[in-house]
């Protein structure tokens, strides 16, 4: 598939997810009883979010689409400027906002207008004054050079058809001395061809993933130093079966239990940290 076709496919897929969430959500309150479905909450706990974090954000911000918790390892400080690549409905942005405080700022970038509408509405509901959402592609960030302290991302860079460009852009906008902390999906071995060619699998973060070695190499080639995998986990079969987006992929492709297991053992979730050193 051509790069623009991939982007359009991802944009349309996530727009459907955003619209589905908007249609199913009628409350405007915040709290554990209204932060999402039991499946969404369960997925969030499995990938590293605490009950307090899940309850902290406005209803509808947590769509259960991540593969880790980059906030937990980012060591955010008061006054920092944080950039979230592929911010979706704003879940990680809102968690970051409370940690950097009123003197800090959080910028979310997403290429799906429906997601941006949802994120901005969530910001209004939660009265977040230090969060801003911008329309843009992570390969061409609408962010000034050397302007952010920390970059986070959660299961989004794997969707990009040009990951090398994503990390080059990340390096451009991050300040000298700044740091990168991303959670993402990588491959431990190549996926079967029927998955690579599946539109649904691409939207579910599978078909666009690359081998772990290639992913880490792209970060280093962009100029980052101290590139380190700080956590890595494979996906248990029951996690793949329970995930609503993955389940849709399996239903669309009519996969057997054996095929599902083959996919599960090929995929890993990693958390990667890196730094942009101050030049002498």
Image (cartoon, rainbow, N blue to C red):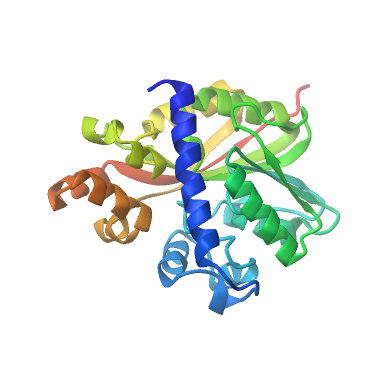
Residue 75 in view of the camera: no
- Left or right: where does residue 262 sit relative to residue 230? left
Residue that appears at 45% across and 59% down: 47
* Residue 83 percent coordinates (x, y): 69, 42
Residue 123 in view of the camera: yes
- Left or right: where does residue 8 sit relative to residue 131? left
* Residue 253 percent coordinates (x, y): 22, 44
Residue that appears at 64% across and 66% down: 57
**In the image shown, does 133 or 5 lie closer to the viewer?**
5
**In the image shown, does 34 or 114 lie closer to the viewer?**
114
Residue 215, compared with residue 117, is above or below; it is above
Residue that appears at 39% across and 33% down: 208
Q: Of all residues shown, which one is farthest toward the front?
A: 23
Residue that appears at 54% across and 67% down: 25
* Residue 33 percent coordinates (x, y): 54, 79
Quadrant of the rendered image containing residue 223: top right
Placement of the C terminus among the 4 image quadrants: top right
């Amino acid at each position: 598939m051509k790069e623009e076709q991939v982007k359009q496919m991802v944009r349309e897929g996530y727009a459907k997810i955003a619209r589905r969430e908007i249609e199913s959500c009628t409350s405007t309150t915040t709290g554990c009883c209204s932060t999402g479905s039991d499946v969404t909450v369960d997925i969030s706990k499995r990938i590293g979010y605490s009950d307090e974090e899940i309850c902290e954000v406005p209803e509808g911000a947590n769509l259960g689409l991540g593969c880790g918790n980059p906030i937990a390892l980012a060591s955010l400080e008061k006054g920092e400027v944080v950039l979230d690549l592929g911010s979706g409905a704003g879940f990680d942005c809102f968690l970051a906002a409370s940690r950097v405080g009123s003197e800090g700022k959080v910028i979310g970038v997403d290429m799906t207008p429906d997601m941006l509408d949802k994120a901005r509405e969530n910001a209004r509901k939660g009265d977040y004054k230090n969060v801003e959402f911008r329309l843009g592609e992570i390969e061409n960030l609408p962010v000034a050079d050397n302007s952010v302290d920390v970059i986070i991302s959660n299961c989004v860079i794997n969707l990009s058809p040009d990951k090398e460009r994503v990390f080059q852009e990340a390096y451009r906008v991050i300040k000298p001395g700044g740091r990168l902390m991303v959670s993402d999906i990588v491959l431990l071995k190549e996926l079967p061809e029927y998955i690579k060619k599946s539109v649904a699998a691409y939207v579910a973060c599978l078909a666009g993933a690359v081998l772990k070695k290639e992913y880490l190499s792209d970060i280093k080639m962009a100029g980052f130093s101290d590139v380190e995998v700080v956590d890595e986990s494979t996906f248990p079969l029951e996690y793949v079966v329970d995930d609503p987006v993955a389940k849709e992929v399996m239903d669309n492709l009519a996969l057997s239990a054996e095929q599902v297991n083959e996919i599960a053992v090929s995929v890993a979730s990693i958390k990667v940290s890196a730094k942009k050193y101050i030049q002498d």
